[in-house]
Amino acid sequence: MSKTITVLGLGYIGLPTALLFAKAGHMVKGVDINKRVVDSLNKGHIHLEENGLPELFKDAKNNFSATTTVGSSDVFLIAVPTPLEKSIHVSDLTYVKSAAEMIFPHLKRGNLVILESTVTPGASEKLVIPILEKSGLVAGEFLYAHCPERAIPGKTLEEMVNNDRIIGGFNNESTLVAKNLYISYVKGKIHTVDVKTAEFAKLIENTYRDVNIALANELAQIAETAGIDVWKAIALANKHPRVNIHSPGPGVGGHCIAVDPWFLTENSSKWGIIQLAREINDAMPNHVLQLVRSLLAGVKDPVITIFGVAYKGNVDDTRETPALKFIKLAENEGFVVKCYDPHIKQFEYPILPLDQAVEGSDCIIIITDHDEFKKINPANLCMRRRNVLDTRNLLDHSLWTKCGFEVKILGTGTKR
Ligand code: SAJ
């Protein structure tokens, strides 16, 4: 049955979710505190880059409108950011709290509130539900579920539709109503559970990935010392049916994997490997700088070019990108740093066109695995010195070598 749904937060998760519900026939109001986002959506423009989103927007437009204020609705869905206060490693739930504050004056008996934003275990019970109860209703009179988003940027729509979904309902009715809503577009299996387990499960998925990447990054550094190609070794190890080692790289970025482990451990003192993994991954930009130093030993007034400031390949997102730490470290050592990224328009540092970014440069450093970098013909690059450091094992190294480049690959013991 078609419902009225209010989605609070029109970012990387909220907007696609709102549009999927709209396309499925529900009447969706998208709410964002940023008036520019609201105006641009109402004029038919999308402010985000995501595969398939423009097409979905076209299909869903008739059932979707954007606004800055909340009104009455059958369902309220919270998809706002939950940042980390970096210096103290504590989650900042301000946006979730203010979304709940915006909802409670409009909450009626039988309405359903869904929290999709990632939160610390227990936050629904201790923080969100008490705010909603300021409506005069107690949980149970209104329905509540935590349904954590689990889609990967770059494949958001595909994963939102096809991935299994966790629904943590406050009571059976909450679970049932939420489940009936999600089946309007979710093709994956729906798993129902209590609220707190849903909060915890979401966090351990990303923590698993962070610890696995930290292992890969440690293996990369061991391999460099041992004179081994870690990429080859990992590919071989992964042929074992029960092994799945992730890839090393310049560090872990994005709003989720670099952040969620801290959400998980915030209320506990029982961590060790989780924090160690964070430290290993956070130190990767320092390691990359060491590799650059050895590649450019003896070069006076070195100029380097960063290929990719997005936190990962083929996305337009720079949140928590390891590129930023690397650039700051490099500048502190006197390197002049120039940046090129075909997906990014706005960044703390200017993003230059390719020819300007490499002009006068002594070394290219591949930080992000954008597909565009594979298509660059190294013969056409006009540089002062021809060095390239590939932290993602992305390029066709024999081609770059043929074009006169000194090639260094993170996680390999030998220069090629
Ligand atoms: N990275 C590596 N090595 C790897 C894989 C990733 O260094 O083998 C790096 C990436 O370059 C990037 C970072 O890790 O800097 C994170 O990228 P990612 O693609 O692994 O994940 P996210 O942050 O884009 O999305 C994750 C996903 N979680 C899982 O796959 C368990 C996604 O499903 C979640 O919805 C999302 O976090 C989230 O919102 O929590």
Image (cartoon, rainbow, N blue to C red):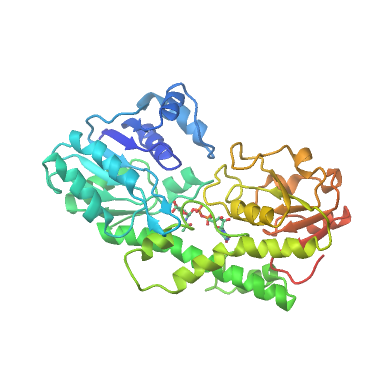
Residue 298 seen in this snapshot: yes
Residue 396 figure quarter: bottom right
Q: Is residue 100 left or right of residue 388?
A: left
Residue, far top: 43
Which quadrant of the figure contains the N terminus?
Answer: top left
Which quadrant of the figure contains the C terminus?
Answer: bottom right
How many numbered circles are shown?
0
Q: Is residue 102 left or right of residue 344?
A: left
Q: What percent of the width, then of the height, locates residue 287?
A: 65, 65
Question: Is residue 359 depicted above or below 198 in this figure?
Answer: above
Residue at the spot 46% in from the left edge and 48% down from the top edge: 159
Residue 409 seen in this snapshot: no
Residue at the spot 65% in from the left edge and 52% down from the top edge: 327
The residue nearer to you, when weighing 215 against 174, is 215
Question: Is residue 172 depicted above or below 52 in this figure?
Answer: below
Question: Is residue 291 depicted above or below 38 in this figure?
Answer: below
Residue, far bottom: 226
Residue at the spot 72% in from the left edge and 64% down from the top edge: 291
Residue at the spot 43% in from the left edge and 74% down from the top edge: 272
The residue nearer to you, when weighing 236 against 108, is 108
Q: What percent of the width, then of the height, locates residue 48?
A: 51, 36
Q: What percent of the width, then of the height, locates residue 388?
A: 78, 56
Q: What percent of the width, then of the height, locates residue 392?
A: 67, 58
Q: Is residue 41 left or right of residue 338?
A: left
The residue nearer to you, when weighing 258 against 55, is 258
